[in-house]
Amino acid sequence: MAQTSQISRKQTDYISPARRTTMGVVFLVMALTIWLGFVISTTSEALTTFVLYPGGSDVIVADLVFASRPILNILAFLCAGLGAYQLAKGFGKWTNTILGVVAGLFIAAFLVWGSSGTSLNLAGLLKVAVVRAVPLTLGAFSGIFCERSGVFNIAIEGMMLTAAFCAALFGSLVNIWFGLFTAVLSGILLAYVLAVLSIKYKVNQIISGTVINIFATGITSFLSAKFLQRHSELNDSGRFTTWNIPGLSDIPFFGPVLFSHNMFIYAMFIFTAVLTVLFFYTRWGLRTRAVGEHPKAADTLGINVNRTRYISVLIGGAMAGFAGAYFVLGSVGRFDEVMTAGRGFVGLAAMIFGNWNPIGSLGAGMLFGFADSLASKLAILKVPIPNKFLEMAPYLVTMIVLAGVVGRGQPPAAGGQPYEKE
Amino acid sequence: MTTSEQKQKKPGSFSIFIEEIRKNSLTVTILAIVSGLLVGGLIAAVTSENVYAAFGESFLAGIGAIFTVFWNTYKALFTGSVGVPADIIAAISSGSWDAINRSLAPFFESLVQATPYIFAGLAVALGFRVGLFNIGAEGQIFVGALATVWVATSLKGWPALVHVPLALLAGAAAGGIWGMVPGWLKAKTGAHEVINTIMMNYIAFRLSEYLLNGVLGDPNKATPISAPIEKSAWLPRIFPDPNRFHCGFFVALLMAFLVYLLLFKTTWGYELRTVGHNPNAARYAGMNITRSIVITMMLSGALAGLAGANEVLGVNHNLGVAFSSGYGFDSIALALLGNSHPLGVVLAALLFGFLRNGAIQMQLSAGIPIDIISVLQALILAFIAAPAIIRTIYRLKEPKPELESPAVETKKGK
C-alpha cells in the first residue's frame, strides 16, 4: 500500500510567466465584469433574497436577505485583489485552485445580481444540481474505469440508454431491485462487447464505441416502440423512494440539499470514495493505472494486460449500467426513447474535466449539474442570457480544458491503443 | 497501401477501387451486410407475437412463422425501397409517364434518402484518410442547415441560379467552420478531435434550439421550426410529385468525384494520405501536418454541412430541431463500409438510403419499428470493423497480412 501512493501522477507545479499573467488578467476581467455588468445595472436599494430550504422540505430556515450592491462590490473586490496578487507575485502551484475560487465568486455574483429585487431558492437550485450530477458523475466513473486501463469508452451513452430500458422493463415485470440488477447486467454485457471488439479483435476503440451507441439507440427504440408503448404496464417500474438520513437530514440548509435523496445520490458519494481508494491506494488500482499508462512495462512486470483491461472495462460497464438505471429508477420511473439525451457524453466531459480522477469527476459532475440546474432557473431570474447558452457551458468548458488553457489534463498515456505482445 | 499505388504508374479510378475492395476483402464486406440483414430479420422474428403463437402450435409451424416474418420483412423492405416489380412492369407496359413515375417513386425516394448519407459519409471518410475521426458530422450538419436556412429565408427575390448555390455555400461554410475548430485545436494543442467534435455536436444542438426558438424560428408556429424557405432556394426537383428526387443527388455525386480527385489525383491529396498513414514520415518529408489537419477537418465539416443544406433545400424546405436522425453517426458506419473511398462511400450510402427508405415502408406494412435499421447498421459496422468475426463465422481463410486492414483500423486513436 505504501509504495502505491508514491507513484502518484506527476503534477505540473511549474507555471510559466505567460500563463501567470494570463490568469491574472482573467481574474481582473471577471472583477471588471462584476462591476460593469452587474453592479451598474443594480439599483442601490435593491435587495437579494435567497431562500434556504427547498420546496416541500420540513427544515425551514429564515430567508437570507441582503442589499445586492454592497455584496457585489465585495465580491468584485475579492476577484480584483486575487487578480492583482496573481499579476504581482503569482500563486504558483495554487493558480488553478485560485481560478476555481474566482470562478466561484463570479458565479455567486451572478446569482446575487440575477436575483436582485426578487428571490431565488438557492437550496432548491443546489438540490437539483446534486440530482442532475448523478448520471454525469457515475458516467464519468464508468469512463475512469475504462480509460485508466487504456480503453476509450465513448459508449457510456449507449450503455446508459440500454440500462435505462432494462431497468424500466424488468423493473415493471419483477421489482425495482431486479430492474437495477438487469440494468447493471446490461451495462456489463455491452461493455463485454466493447472489450471483445477493442481488446480481442483490436478494432479501433472509437469505432467499437460507435457500434454500441448506434446499436443501443436502435434496439431500445425498436423494443420500446414494439412493446413498451403498446403495453404501458411494461413501462411502469416505480422508483426508489427518498430516504432521509437520520440526523443529517435535519441540518438546516445542508440537510435537505445533501441528505434527503434516493439511494442513487448517496451511491454517487460512496462510489467517489471507493474509487479513490481503489485506484490510488490498492495494488489493483496501481496495476490498472500501469496498464493504462505503459502496458509494455506492466507486462514486463508480469501483469496480464488484456485481462486487466477486460476486468476494468466490465466494471466500467456495470457503472454505466448503474448510471443508466438512475434515469428510470431514480428519476422518472418510466423509459422514453433516447431519454439519456447525451448525458453519457457529458459524463465523458466530466471525466476529462475531472482529470480522470474520481474526486475531480465528482466536482465536474456537480459543476455541470449546477449549470444544468441553473439553466432551468434562468427564466425565473430574468437575466438577459438565453438558457441554451448556459446549457452549452459543460461542453465549452471541456474544450477549454482539453486545449490546455486552464491547466492541461493528463489522460492515460496508452489510451486507445490495443496492446500487442511482442 | 501507398507503396502499391506508387508501383502502378497511373492507376485508373476503377482499378484503385478494386484494389481497395480486395484489401478490405469484398467477400467480408458482402458477408457483413448479409449477416447484418440476417440478424436483423432474426430480431424481427424473435420480437414477433405470431412466431410465439405458431411455436405454441407446433415446432414446424414456428419455423414456418419465422420464415414468414423474414419474407414479409424483406419483401416490405424491398418494395419500400425499390418499388413493387409487378407495378413497375405494368406501368412501363401501359406507357403512361404518370404511372411510371408513381411506380418508380420508391426507388427515387431511396436516392433522396441516400443523398445526405453520401455527403456525410464523404465527410467522415475524408477524415479517416487523414487519420482523423470526425464524430462531429451530426453537429456540422445542424450548423450547415442553420446557415442554409438563414440564407434561404432571408434573401428574397433572388434568381434561383444564384440563390441555390449561395445557400449551399452557406451550409458548407458553416459546417466548415464547425469542423475547423476541432481540427485547429488538435493541430495546435493536441486536444483529441473525437472529444472536441462530440462537444461541438452538443453545442450545435443547443445553438439550433436557441436559434429556432428565436431569430430563425417561425413566429406563427408554436414549435421550434423555421419559416419555409424561399422558392428560389429550392433544389430543383426532376420529376413531378410525388417523386421527391432532386438535384442534390448530383451535387453529392459531384462532391464524391471531387473528393476522389483531391485524394488520389493531386500532390496535396497524396500529402494528406501520407499524414494519415504515417504522420512521422510526413513530418520528416517536410509536409505541413498542422495545415493538413486543419484543412481536412474544415473540408470534412463543409461536406457534412452540405448534407444539412441538402436536406433543407431539397427535401424539407424548412428546418426543425429534430430534422437529422443520426446521419452523422450512421455516416461513420458507412465510411468504414465504403473503406473510406469516395466510390465505396457512394455505394454504402446507397445501401443505407435504400435500407432507410425501405424501413419506412416496413414500419407501415410489416409493423416493424424503423429503428431496426440502426440495429442493422450497428451490426454491419461491427462486422466490417472486425472482419475476424465474419471469418470465424464463415470459416474464411486469413488473408495475407498486408492485404488486411483499411487505413483507419491501423490508425490508433491517440
Image: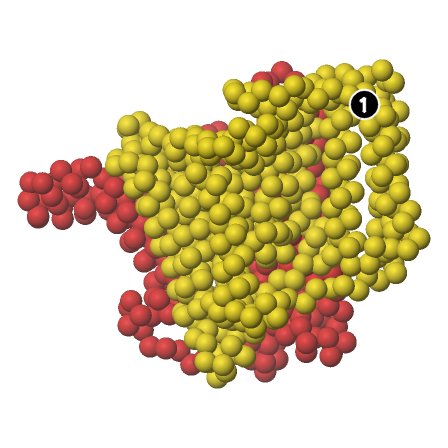
The residue sitting at 8% across, 48% down in the picture is: B60
The location of residue A19, given as percent across then percent down, is 84, 57
> Does B212 appear above or below B246?
above
Residue furthest to the left in view is B58
The location of residue B323, given as percent across then percent down, is 54, 35
The residue sitting at 73% across, 75% down in the picture is: B283
| Colour in which the image shows chain B | red
Q: Quadrant of residue B209?
A: top right
Comparing A393 with A52, the one in front is A52
- Is residue A353 visible in this depiction of the protein? yes
- The residue wearing badge 1 is A68
Q: Quadrant of residue A238?
A: top left
- Is residue B319 visible in this depiction of the protein? no
Given the image, on which type of amino acid does mark 1 rest?
A: Ser
Q: Which chain is disc 1 placed on?
A: A
Residue furthest to the front in view is A247
